[in-house]
């Protein structure tokens, strides 16, 4: 059974709308991340959270807002969607913060298409 | 900033032949280096990691040596199988962030 659940697996949105991508991990990990994969930039880091606090943000646009309501949840809200936002968004987690020390476990991704 | 550059794909090989995927990196830190593999419809998964310079990592017949002097971390396998067909990513870990290369798509033909 998948230990990192991402919902929805596929979604289509219209330009200017808003979507929320859901991520829950059942690995008991303390750090969670969002990555984006597109044709232009494969596996691009977006955010990292540790113990529900934002650690690192390398997303230029404020249209992307992570939300952590529980320790094992890290959702991603995207507002004012643009066609360039079309990508597969991967949630990941690690036992402790520090991508350089431990293994990252990735979900299966949420593929977003913006028309 | 940190960056990773790897062999441009795609790469097509016949079963039983050898594989080399070149990876070079730039950083001012002392990173941990990783190879990840991604199968269709799945997220990336760790193949192996090497935390220290001049050490070798390996898994499932794949191996790579962390060469600090050459800033390289090339992936090798002596004899590929059809089941090795996937996209391979070299990655550099800099505390909270894992920086991935562009990926190399490997197709192994029977």
Image (spheres, rainbow, N blue to C red):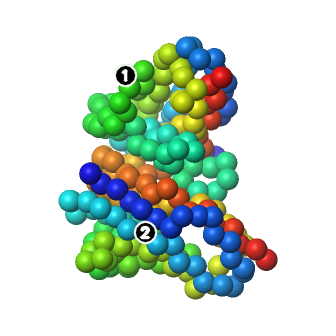
Q: Residue at x 44, y 75 (%)?
A: B74
- The part of the image, by quadrant, that contains residue B26 is bottom left
Q: Position of residue B36 (x, y in %)?
A: 50, 61
Rate crowding at label 2 as few (under 14), some (14 to 19) or many (20 or more) other CA atoms within 10 Å: many
Which residue corresponds to mark 2?
Answer: B23
Q: Residue furthest right?
A: B110
Q: Secondary structure at mark 1?
A: loop
Name the foreground residue: B11 vs A78: B11
Which chain's residue wears label 1? A
Q: Residue at x 46, y 65 (%)?
A: B6
Where does the image place residue A55, in percent across and percent down from the top left? 27, 36
Mark 2 chain? B
Vertical side of B26 occupied by B94: above or below: above
The one of A27 and A34 positioned closer to us in this rendering: A34
Check the image and report above or below for A70 versus A79: below
Q: For the residues tagged 2 and 1, is the chain the same?
A: no
Q: Quadrant of the C terminus of chain A?
A: top right
Label 1: which residue? A62
Secondary structure of the residue carrying tag 2 is: strand
Q: Is residue A6 left or right of residue B51?
A: right
One can see residue A56 in this view: yes
Residue B62 drawn above or below residue A10: below
Image height of A114 relative to B17, above or below? above
């Amino acid at each position: 059974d998948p230990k990192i659940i991402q919902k929805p697996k596929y979604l289509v949105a219209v330009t200017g709308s808003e979507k929320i991508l859901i991520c829950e991990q059942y690995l008991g990990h303390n750090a969670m991340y969002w990555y984006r994969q597109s044709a232009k930039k494969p596996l691009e880091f977006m955010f990292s959270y540790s113990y529900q606090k934002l650690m690192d943000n390398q997303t230029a646009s404020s249209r992307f807002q992570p939300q952590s309501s529980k320790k094992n949840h890290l959702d991603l809200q995207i507002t004012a969607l643009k066609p360039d936002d079309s990508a597969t968004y991967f949630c990941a987690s690690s036992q402790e913060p520090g991508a350089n020390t431990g293994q990252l476990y990735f979900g299966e991704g949420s593929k977003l298409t913006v028309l | 900033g940190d960056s990773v550059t790897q062999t441009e794909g795609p790469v097509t090989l016949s079963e039983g032949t050898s594989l080399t995927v070149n990876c070079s990196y730039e950083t001012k830190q002392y990173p941990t280096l990783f190879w990840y593999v991604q199968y269709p419809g799945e997220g990336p998964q760790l193949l192996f990691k090497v935390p220290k310079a001049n050490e070798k990592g390996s898994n499932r017949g794949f191996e790579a040596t962390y060469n600090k002097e050459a800033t390289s971390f090339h992936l090798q396998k002596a004899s590929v199988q059809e089941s090795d067909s996937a996209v391979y990513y070299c990655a550099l870990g800099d505390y909270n962030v894992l920086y991935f290369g562009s990926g190399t798509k490997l197709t192994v033909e029977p």
